[in-house]
Amino acid sequence: MMNNHIKIAATSPLLEVRNLRKSFGGRRRNSGPIIAVDDISFTLEPGECLAVVGESGSGKSTLARTLLRLVEADSGAVLYGGRDLLTLSHADMQRQRRFLQMVFQDPYASLHPRRTVAELISEPWEIHPGVVAKAERKDRIEALLAEVNLPKHFYSYYPNQMSGGQRQRVAIARALALEPKILILDEPVSALDVSVQAQVIKVLMALQERRGLAYIFISHDLPLVRLVAHKIAVMHRGSFVETGPTETVFENPTHEYTRSLLASSLSTSKGVDAH
Protein backbone atom coordinates (compact mmCIF):
# COMPACT_ATOMS: atom_id res chain seq x y z
CA MET A 1 0.00 0.00 0.00
CA MET A 2 1.28 3.45 -0.86
CA ASN A 3 1.88 5.77 2.06
CA ASN A 4 2.36 9.42 1.18
CA HIS A 5 1.43 10.54 4.67
CA ILE A 6 3.73 13.09 6.29
CA LYS A 7 4.76 11.82 9.72
CA ILE A 8 3.67 14.16 12.48
CA ALA A 9 5.60 14.56 15.71
CA ALA A 10 3.62 13.79 18.85
CA THR A 11 4.22 17.32 20.19
CA SER A 12 3.15 19.11 17.00
CA PRO A 13 -0.37 20.24 16.11
CA LEU A 14 -2.01 18.15 13.46
CA LEU A 15 -2.77 21.33 11.52
CA GLU A 16 -1.40 24.84 11.98
CA VAL A 17 -2.83 27.80 10.08
CA ARG A 18 -0.86 31.04 10.05
CA ASN A 19 -2.12 34.45 8.92
CA LEU A 20 -4.36 33.06 6.20
CA ARG A 21 -5.91 35.62 3.90
CA LYS A 22 -8.30 35.39 0.96
CA SER A 23 -9.98 38.22 -0.93
CA PHE A 24 -12.23 38.46 -3.97
CA GLY A 25 -12.87 41.12 -6.58
CA GLY A 26 -11.59 44.65 -6.43
CA ARG A 27 -11.19 45.11 -10.17
CA ARG A 28 -14.09 47.50 -10.67
CA ARG A 29 -13.49 51.23 -10.53
CA ASN A 30 -13.83 52.62 -7.00
CA SER A 31 -14.30 49.08 -5.68
CA GLY A 32 -11.86 47.50 -3.25
CA PRO A 33 -11.48 43.76 -2.70
CA ILE A 34 -13.88 41.84 -0.48
CA ILE A 35 -11.75 40.26 2.24
CA ALA A 36 -13.41 36.93 3.00
CA VAL A 37 -10.64 35.49 5.21
CA ASP A 38 -8.62 38.08 7.07
CA ASP A 39 -5.40 37.07 8.88
CA ILE A 40 -6.75 33.80 10.32
CA SER A 41 -4.48 31.71 12.56
CA PHE A 42 -5.26 28.59 14.61
CA THR A 43 -4.07 25.08 15.47
CA LEU A 44 -5.91 21.76 15.41
CA GLU A 45 -4.79 18.86 17.58
CA PRO A 46 -5.31 15.14 16.85
CA GLY A 47 -8.82 14.06 17.87
CA GLU A 48 -9.97 17.63 18.48
CA CYS A 49 -13.12 19.32 17.21
CA LEU A 50 -12.76 23.02 16.42
CA ALA A 51 -16.05 24.74 15.62
CA VAL A 52 -16.00 27.83 13.43
CA VAL A 53 -19.19 29.77 14.04
CA GLY A 54 -20.70 32.95 12.66
CA GLU A 55 -23.53 34.32 10.60
CA SER A 56 -23.95 33.67 6.89
CA GLY A 57 -21.41 35.68 4.94
CA SER A 58 -18.86 35.75 7.75
CA GLY A 59 -16.32 33.79 5.68
CA LYS A 60 -16.65 30.33 7.23
CA SER A 61 -17.11 28.35 4.00
CA THR A 62 -14.42 30.32 2.20
CA LEU A 63 -12.05 29.48 5.04
CA ALA A 64 -12.85 25.77 4.63
CA ARG A 65 -12.26 25.83 0.90
CA THR A 66 -9.07 27.82 1.26
CA LEU A 67 -7.62 25.27 3.69
CA LEU A 68 -8.01 22.57 1.03
CA ARG A 69 -7.02 24.88 -1.82
CA LEU A 70 -10.38 24.53 -3.49
CA VAL A 71 -9.85 28.25 -3.72
CA GLU A 72 -6.33 29.65 -3.55
CA ALA A 73 -5.26 31.84 -0.64
CA ASP A 74 -3.74 35.27 -1.16
CA SER A 75 -1.18 34.71 1.59
CA GLY A 76 -0.46 32.80 4.76
CA ALA A 77 0.43 29.19 5.53
CA VAL A 78 -1.47 25.94 6.15
CA LEU A 79 0.95 23.52 7.81
CA TYR A 80 0.19 19.81 7.88
CA GLY A 81 3.03 17.84 9.41
CA GLY A 82 5.14 20.98 9.26
CA ARG A 83 4.76 21.24 5.48
CA ASP A 84 2.94 24.20 3.96
CA LEU A 85 0.10 22.90 1.81
CA LEU A 86 -0.18 26.25 0.06
CA THR A 87 3.25 25.80 -1.52
CA LEU A 88 2.72 22.25 -2.85
CA SER A 89 2.43 21.40 -6.53
CA HIS A 90 -0.98 20.33 -7.80
CA ALA A 91 0.08 16.66 -7.74
CA ASP A 92 1.52 16.85 -4.23
CA MET A 93 -1.56 18.66 -2.95
CA GLN A 94 -3.80 15.98 -4.44
CA ARG A 95 -1.83 13.34 -2.56
CA GLN A 96 -2.14 15.26 0.70
CA ARG A 97 -5.91 15.77 0.28
CA ARG A 98 -6.21 12.11 1.12
CA PHE A 99 -5.65 13.10 4.75
CA LEU A 100 -7.84 16.20 4.78
CA GLN A 101 -11.33 15.48 3.53
CA MET A 102 -14.44 17.66 3.35
CA VAL A 103 -18.14 16.97 3.84
CA PHE A 104 -20.34 19.60 2.21
CA GLN A 105 -23.66 21.06 3.35
CA ASP A 106 -25.89 19.65 0.63
CA PRO A 107 -25.43 15.90 0.13
CA TYR A 108 -27.64 15.84 -2.94
CA ALA A 109 -25.45 18.39 -4.70
CA SER A 110 -22.20 16.69 -3.66
CA LEU A 111 -23.18 13.17 -4.84
CA HIS A 112 -23.36 12.39 -8.56
CA PRO A 113 -27.01 11.43 -9.21
CA ARG A 114 -26.17 8.72 -11.78
CA ARG A 115 -23.68 6.81 -9.64
CA THR A 116 -24.52 4.11 -7.13
CA VAL A 117 -23.45 4.30 -3.52
CA ALA A 118 -20.72 1.75 -4.27
CA GLU A 119 -19.40 3.89 -7.12
CA LEU A 120 -19.56 7.06 -5.05
CA ILE A 121 -17.66 5.59 -2.10
CA SER A 122 -15.05 3.87 -4.28
CA GLU A 123 -14.41 6.93 -6.46
CA PRO A 124 -11.58 8.25 -4.22
CA TRP A 125 -9.75 4.94 -4.66
CA GLU A 126 -9.51 5.60 -8.39
CA ILE A 127 -7.60 8.77 -7.60
CA HIS A 128 -5.56 7.09 -4.83
CA PRO A 129 -5.32 3.49 -6.14
CA GLY A 130 -2.88 2.26 -3.52
CA VAL A 131 -5.27 2.73 -0.58
CA VAL A 132 -7.54 -0.30 -1.07
CA ALA A 133 -6.88 -3.23 -3.42
CA LYS A 134 -9.64 -3.80 -5.98
CA ALA A 135 -10.36 -7.28 -4.63
CA GLU A 136 -11.05 -5.81 -1.19
CA ARG A 137 -13.22 -2.88 -2.22
CA LYS A 138 -16.66 -4.48 -1.93
CA ASP A 139 -15.99 -5.57 1.65
CA ARG A 140 -14.51 -2.19 2.46
CA ILE A 141 -17.57 -0.36 1.10
CA GLU A 142 -19.86 -2.52 3.21
CA ALA A 143 -17.71 -1.83 6.28
CA LEU A 144 -17.87 1.92 5.65
CA LEU A 145 -21.65 1.75 5.26
CA ALA A 146 -21.84 -0.04 8.60
CA GLU A 147 -19.74 2.69 10.21
CA VAL A 148 -22.30 5.30 9.19
CA ASN A 149 -25.25 3.10 10.20
CA LEU A 150 -26.45 2.15 6.73
CA PRO A 151 -27.27 -1.44 5.70
CA LYS A 152 -25.10 -3.11 3.09
CA HIS A 153 -27.93 -3.31 0.54
CA PHE A 154 -27.51 0.47 0.07
CA TYR A 155 -24.48 -0.57 -1.98
CA SER A 156 -26.57 -0.46 -5.16
CA TYR A 157 -28.76 2.58 -4.33
CA TYR A 158 -28.70 5.87 -6.21
CA PRO A 159 -28.88 9.23 -4.38
CA ASN A 160 -32.51 9.85 -5.36
CA GLN A 161 -33.49 6.59 -3.63
CA MET A 162 -32.30 7.86 -0.26
CA SER A 163 -33.38 10.46 2.27
CA GLY A 164 -31.30 13.56 2.98
CA GLY A 165 -29.84 12.06 6.13
CA GLN A 166 -28.94 8.83 4.34
CA ARG A 167 -27.27 10.77 1.53
CA GLN A 168 -25.22 12.74 4.02
CA ARG A 169 -24.08 9.52 5.69
CA VAL A 170 -22.98 8.24 2.27
CA ALA A 171 -21.03 11.49 1.83
CA ILE A 172 -19.36 10.88 5.19
CA ALA A 173 -18.54 7.28 4.22
CA ARG A 174 -16.96 8.52 1.00
CA ALA A 175 -14.87 11.03 2.96
CA LEU A 176 -13.70 8.21 5.25
CA ALA A 177 -12.68 5.96 2.35
CA LEU A 178 -9.17 7.42 2.23
CA GLU A 179 -8.56 7.10 6.01
CA PRO A 180 -8.23 10.86 6.60
CA LYS A 181 -6.88 12.45 9.76
CA ILE A 182 -9.01 15.59 9.43
CA LEU A 183 -12.61 16.09 8.32
CA ILE A 184 -13.74 19.60 7.42
CA LEU A 185 -17.50 19.63 7.94
CA ASP A 186 -19.18 22.59 6.26
CA GLU A 187 -22.65 22.95 7.83
CA PRO A 188 -23.03 19.15 7.58
CA VAL A 189 -26.55 18.96 9.03
CA SER A 190 -28.08 22.38 8.32
CA ALA A 191 -29.96 21.10 5.24
CA LEU A 192 -31.58 18.27 7.25
CA ASP A 193 -34.66 18.03 9.45
CA VAL A 194 -33.99 18.37 13.17
CA SER A 195 -34.69 14.69 13.94
CA VAL A 196 -32.33 13.63 11.14
CA GLN A 197 -29.67 16.06 12.30
CA ALA A 198 -29.40 14.17 15.57
CA GLN A 199 -28.82 10.88 13.73
CA VAL A 200 -26.00 12.32 11.63
CA ILE A 201 -24.40 14.03 14.63
CA LYS A 202 -24.42 10.72 16.52
CA VAL A 203 -22.59 9.12 13.61
CA LEU A 204 -19.99 11.91 13.51
CA MET A 205 -19.38 11.81 17.26
CA ALA A 206 -18.99 8.02 17.25
CA LEU A 207 -16.59 8.17 14.31
CA GLN A 208 -14.46 10.79 16.00
CA GLU A 209 -14.15 8.70 19.14
CA ARG A 210 -13.52 5.43 17.30
CA ARG A 211 -11.09 6.75 14.68
CA GLY A 212 -9.50 9.62 16.59
CA LEU A 213 -10.45 12.06 13.84
CA ALA A 214 -9.95 15.80 14.09
CA TYR A 215 -12.86 17.95 12.92
CA ILE A 216 -13.19 21.51 11.71
CA PHE A 217 -16.93 21.91 12.23
CA ILE A 218 -18.42 24.92 10.46
CA SER A 219 -21.83 25.94 11.73
CA HIS A 220 -24.14 28.75 12.72
CA ASP A 221 -26.02 26.46 15.16
CA LEU A 222 -24.57 27.31 18.58
CA PRO A 223 -26.48 24.72 20.65
CA LEU A 224 -25.19 22.02 18.29
CA VAL A 225 -21.65 23.41 18.46
CA ARG A 226 -21.75 23.31 22.26
CA LEU A 227 -22.56 19.62 22.03
CA VAL A 228 -19.77 18.59 19.67
CA ALA A 229 -16.85 21.03 19.88
CA HIS A 230 -13.80 21.14 22.14
CA LYS A 231 -13.03 24.72 21.20
CA ILE A 232 -14.70 27.51 19.26
CA ALA A 233 -13.57 30.23 16.88
CA VAL A 234 -16.12 33.00 16.34
CA MET A 235 -15.83 34.47 12.84
CA HIS A 236 -17.09 37.91 11.86
CA ARG A 237 -16.37 39.73 8.60
CA GLY A 238 -13.53 37.36 7.76
CA SER A 239 -11.75 37.51 11.12
CA PHE A 240 -11.72 35.42 14.27
CA VAL A 241 -12.99 37.85 16.90
CA GLU A 242 -12.93 35.31 19.75
CA THR A 243 -11.46 31.85 20.30
CA GLY A 244 -11.31 29.53 23.27
CA PRO A 245 -12.55 26.33 24.92
CA THR A 246 -16.22 25.77 24.20
CA GLU A 247 -17.53 26.22 27.72
CA THR A 248 -15.39 29.30 28.30
CA VAL A 249 -16.77 31.01 25.20
CA PHE A 250 -20.35 30.08 26.10
CA GLU A 251 -20.12 31.00 29.77
CA ASN A 252 -17.86 34.03 29.56
CA PRO A 253 -17.86 35.55 26.07
CA THR A 254 -15.57 38.57 25.76
CA HIS A 255 -16.55 40.02 22.36
CA GLU A 256 -19.80 41.85 21.72
CA TYR A 257 -20.40 39.89 18.50
CA THR A 258 -20.12 36.60 20.39
CA ARG A 259 -22.58 37.84 23.00
CA SER A 260 -25.05 38.82 20.27
CA LEU A 261 -24.77 35.38 18.64
CA LEU A 262 -25.38 33.66 21.96
CA ALA A 263 -28.36 35.87 22.74
CA SER A 264 -29.85 35.14 19.32
CA SER A 265 -29.31 31.40 19.71
CA LEU A 266 -31.23 31.33 22.99
CA SER A 267 -34.36 32.56 21.21
CA THR A 268 -34.01 30.35 18.11
CA SER A 269 -32.54 27.15 19.58
CA LYS A 270 -33.63 24.01 17.79
CA GLY A 271 -32.88 21.84 20.77
CA VAL A 272 -30.80 19.23 18.93
CA ASP A 273 -29.98 16.36 21.28
CA ALA A 274 -27.57 13.74 20.03
CA HIS A 275 -27.22 11.83 23.28
Image (tube, helix red, strand yellow):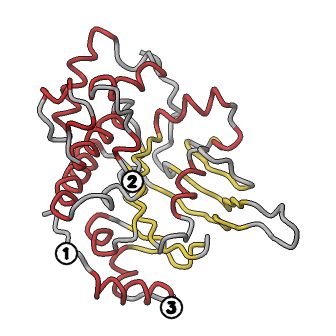
Residue type highlighted by circle 1: Gly
> Residue lying farthest top?
135
Q: Nearer the viewer, mark 2 or mark 3?
A: 2
Give the side of residue 187 with respect to residue 165, left or right: right
* Label 2 element class: loop
Mark earlier in primary sequence (2, 3): 2
Give 265 or 225, whichever is nearer the viewer.
Answer: 265
Are the residues at dot 3 and dot 1 in contact (C-beta closer than 8 Å)?
Answer: no
* The image quarter in which residue 122 lies: top left
Q: Secondary structure at mark 3?
A: helix
Number of numbered discs: 3
* Quadrant of the rendered image containing residue 174: top left
Categorize mark 3 by other alpha carbons within 10 Å: few (<14), some (14-19), many (20+): few
**Quadrant that contains the N terminus:** top left
Question: 88 left or right of 194?
Answer: right
Is residue 217 or residue 26 the one in the foreground? 26
* Disc sitting over residue 256 in the figure: 3
**Could you give the CA–CA distance between mark 2 and mark 3, rounded to whole angstroms?**
28 Å
For marks 3 and 1, the one nearer the N-term is 3
* Residue on which disc 1 sits: 271
Picture coordinates of residue 251, whole percent (x, y): 34, 87
State the residue lying farthest toward the right. Answer: 29
Q: Amino acid at mark 3?
A: Glu
- Mark identifier at residue 105: 2
Query: Looking at numbered disc 2 in the image, what kind of residue is underneath it?
Result: Gln
